[in-house]
Image (spheres, rainbow, N blue to C red):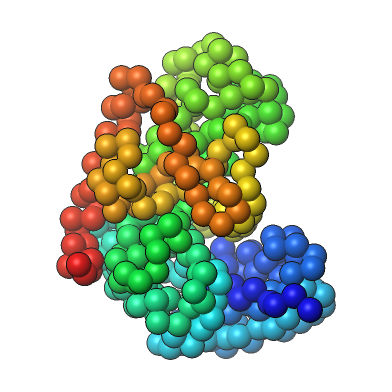
Amino acid sequence: MTHPIRVAVTGAAGQIGYAMLFRLASGEIFGPDQPVILHLVEVPPVLSALDGVEMELEDCAFPTLAGVVKADSDHLEDAFADCNFVICVGSVPRKAGMERGDLIRINGPIFTNTGKAIEAAAADDVRVLVVGNPCNTNCLIAMANAPKVPRDRWYAMTRLDENRAVSQIAKKAGQPVSAVKNMNIWGNHSATQFPDFYHATIHGSPVPEIIEDHDWLRGEFIETVQKRGAAVIAARGASSAASAANAALDTIKSIITPTPLGASFSAAVCSDGSYGVDEGLICGFPLTSDGTTWKLVEGIEHDDFAQEKFKATLQELRDERDVVRDLLPG
Ligand code: NAX
């Protein structure tokens, strides 16, 4: 029998975690022949909610679900023991009146412990996807606190931004979403991100050749993608949940599947200094995967407009790093 994959999800009883678990258990992500053991991680007061989540998982009778482990955030080494994937969703959401810097300081310490526990207890091949915001900088903190885990194993999620951008472009062009490729997100998962429409294609042709309204591309399009999270909150009264869970699962699928020739996907990973990004920052780039590790797509040239956008989002990442320097050993 195939050895089970262990997947930990922190914040498992939260809205994104809950939306993700059933698809992880169902065989959709790792395949119908790959058993999965889910590690559900929550803060101690929420542990009892995990009992209900476990019952629901049982009630789905997924043939691929080989077990459920429940653990609390005070015992992260138990939570991540032998895990092959750790999806870090659990964190404190931003509340009204809270500055981004405040949020970073509140959530930062969660990720020092997360990094340490991953290094101490996870499987040798562990791969980590950080969803909890500010996800780039949280990922940076976790990575810095797990120096023995290779740097190509750390990802922060920009896929929701990519998916949002794909849908906006497809709608504007009157084409199906499947026609839009290489819609990559550069920089931070925040309102400064740069969705690079220049190098995206529709049925193989560059987006700016198909969508002639370049003012829309440079203005409304970018702004819509950057502010989509806030728009969802305004309309739904709650932040993106199913779409965020879907994007996390899309990211995992892209990581474990060799990328088709000429295609790319978006995630934030540890910079090697390419494109002028400080070595070690967790920055959104276009990537390809061989099914195990990633490569940056090289040789992309940005015009003056794109460079300005990229500069702004890069500066924000540097500023965030400076706010948490004390949480970055080494
Ligand atoms: P919820 O508040 O519904 O769920 C968060 C869960 O995390 C709660 O159940 C809470 O008990 C748990 N939690 C808190 N601290 C924890 C810790 N130290 N260890 C384990 N669990 C802990 O929030 P939800 O809507 O699920 O959002 C979760 C995170 O995703 C937030 O930080 C949010 O900002 C972020 N998002 C990131 C996105 C991205 O694209 N990267 C998009 C969606 C979302 O906004």
In depth, the one of 294 and 321 nearer the eye is 294
Is residue 35 positioned above or below 135 on the image?
below
The residue sitting at 69% across, 60% down in the picture is 29
Tell me if I can see residue 123 in this picture: yes
Residue 196 lies left or right of residue 310; in this view the side is right
Tell me if I can see residue 138 in this picture: no
Can you give x and y, in whole percent of width and height, for residue 18 in the image? 62, 69
Is residue 248 positioned above or below 45 on the image?
above
Is residue 172 positioned above or below 286 on the image?
above
In depth, the one of 125 and 52 nearer the eye is 125
Write down the quadrant of residue 100 in the picture: bottom left
In depth, the one of 124 and 181 nearer the eye is 124
Residue 38 lies left or right of residue 10; in this view the side is right
Q: How many marks?
A: 0
The residue sitting at 47% across, 15% down in the picture is 214
Q: Which quadrant: the C terminus?
A: bottom left
Q: Which quadrant: the N terminus?
A: bottom right
Residue 117 lies left or right of residue 67; in this view the side is left
Can you give x and y, in whole percent of width and height, for residue 73 in the image? 43, 83
Can you give x and y, in whole percent of width and height, for residue 274 in the image? 33, 39
The residue sitting at 52% across, 69% down in the picture is 125
The residue sitting at 41% across, 28% down in the picture is 299
Can you give x and y, in whole percent of width and height, for residue 78 in the image? 48, 88
Is residue 99 positioned above or below 74 on the image?
above
In depth, the one of 68 and 147 nearer the eye is 147
